[in-house]
Image (cartoon, helix red, strand yellow):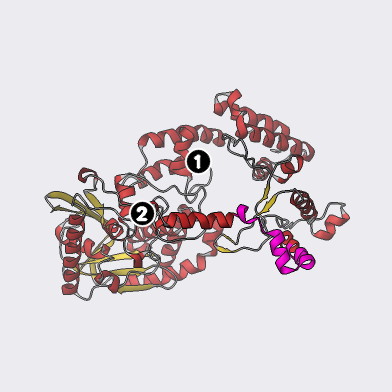
Amino acid sequence: QRLAALEIGFLRGARRWGDVADLCAYIPRRTEEMKDAPYGSIAPQTRDAALGIVHPLSDIAGARALPFADAEGLIDGREAVSALTGLINALAGDEMRVWTGPEGVAASRLLESVSTLTAELGPMLPDMFVEIVRTLASTITVQADGPSHPRLAIWGPLEARLQQADRIVLAGLNETVWPAQPAPDAFLPRRFRVQLGLTAPEARLGLAAHDFAQLASAPDVWMLYAARRDDAPAVPSRWVLRLKTLAEGALGKDGARAALSPRPEADPRNWAAALRADLQTKPAQFSKPAPCPPLEARPDQLSVTRIDTLQRDPYSIYAGSILKLSALEALDAPLDARPRGTAIHAALEDFEGLPPEAQTKETLHRLLMDKLSEAGSPDHMVEAESAVLSKTAEQFYDWWKLRQGERLTVWPEEKGRLELMIEGRPFALTGVADSLEKMKDGTYTIIDFKTGAGKTRTQIDAGFEQQLPLLAVIAREGELKHAPSGPVGEFGYVSVRYNFSAKMTSKGGEDAEALADAGRDILIELIGAYRKPDAKYFSVPRIKLISAYAGDFDRLARRAEWAGDTSDD
């Protein structure tokens, strides 16, 4: 349970920590960041459980002195393996359990391989030992210890070579999958390998071809390859292409197609067509999800961004705010748009809070790089992006400098709240203005920073993008955290990217007031509609918004079944 708390709460998503000490500091910071999340917040007991695992590791990592190191700081690999084994036993607390099951067997095999390899290398630096462990660990696959099927077995080529089955399915017959391409060797070019008497990298291709030829000669064989991989066209394995060429040369195209195709009664393509034809006669199985939760379970508070979500994809509000579900991110996921946008927002907020003498282009550039690094972007990627970030910082600074004479006070990341009575029940609208600025004419300007393109006036007039008009309503009628409420003279989007742009969406004070009034009417009508007992939370009900919106809960809503998506996902 503690491991699950650590993984789900703090290890998923972009990696925002380096060593164990960084992870110890990140866990409470992440808990605080997620405190006000609409869903996916981290409970204090989850934080404490994760820290209970990480703190002992931090104490060990802080003790850099190794008792078995010599005067020069070199260590013997076998002694290091013995110490590592003792550490695992001490942390596990149960020496018998830690070495059982697939994970225990894999860990034992790893330490045995490390001991065998390091015994031949002699004394080494501790960092070299760490790299050896990491490299060997990356080559080991741990299979889940689940119940086996009585008639189905999944084997690797070696296991399949040693056993027999009534039917063999050769899957993954795509180039770069089977056969896998030999890894590039930057240390030993091909001619040096020959001189040293080492095998050529292509030797593994020959062994793989031998496995394929042996398995493909079974009496009943199905060969599978993907038409697309990673959302791109995939190339069949060279063995599939050569087999087709050989068959066509001997039998002709029609004869080869007949010889290589499965029997009609055993063709999975015919099975799929029959299933589709049968299901088309039963439309109830493809019905759209239409949850209708009780009124007391429906949210009484939403942020301005969630109001837009309620219009675009009500099912996401149902899953997130009513069922309290949240999407799990991948481990060590690449930095996507959301954490990247949060990092850039944090850099701009810190920049606004600096004393005037420190507010320079160079400072903003450094803040952007530091915040992206903290958000989980690898250091080499941040450095590679340095020139782009420098240009972005320069363009933003020039725009920001021009506005200094027009504004009196600035509140970055200003929170607000507005209480309303809708259909006889209270409703709270919340929001955060990236930059709330008090201008010389006494009105407010609301700026929303984007790392992509800003929203258009057409989208706002159509009623789908009401974030800024609703923020104007909160500033005018609600309660702000630091600033007094007051009228909004204008609002707009600033795209903080290489192609920098700053555009006010509203056109003067009267226009801003009119957009705010329209946004307020849309809010009351929308929330009022979902206060009716028969209101249902559909999944992306507006067809024209499907391509523009990717929800976390599309798979849960089973959109591919009822929306006519016939892809192979």
Residue shown at the point (45%, 43%) measured from the top left: 10
Identify which residue, 296 or 450, lies in the foreground.
296
Q: CA distance from mark 1 to mark 2?
A: 51 Å
Identify which residue, 413 or 555, lies in the foreground.
555
Q: Please name the residue that numbered disc 2 is placed on.
A: 287
Residue type marked 1:
Ala
Identify which residue, 198 or 270, lies in the foreground.
270
First to last magenta residue range: 244-267
396 versus 53 height, above or below = below
Q: Magenta-highlighted stretch: main secondary structure?
A: helix
117 versus 245 height, above or below = above
Residue type marked 2:
Ser
Instruction: Looking at this view, name the residue that lies furthest to the front.
Output: 265
Residue 417 image offset from top left, x and y in percent: 20, 53
Residue 167 — which label? none
Identify which residue, 433 or 370, lies in the foreground.
433
Residue 21 — which label? 1
Regarding residue 308, the answer to whether it shows in the image is yes
Regarding residue 38, the answer to whether it shows in the image is no
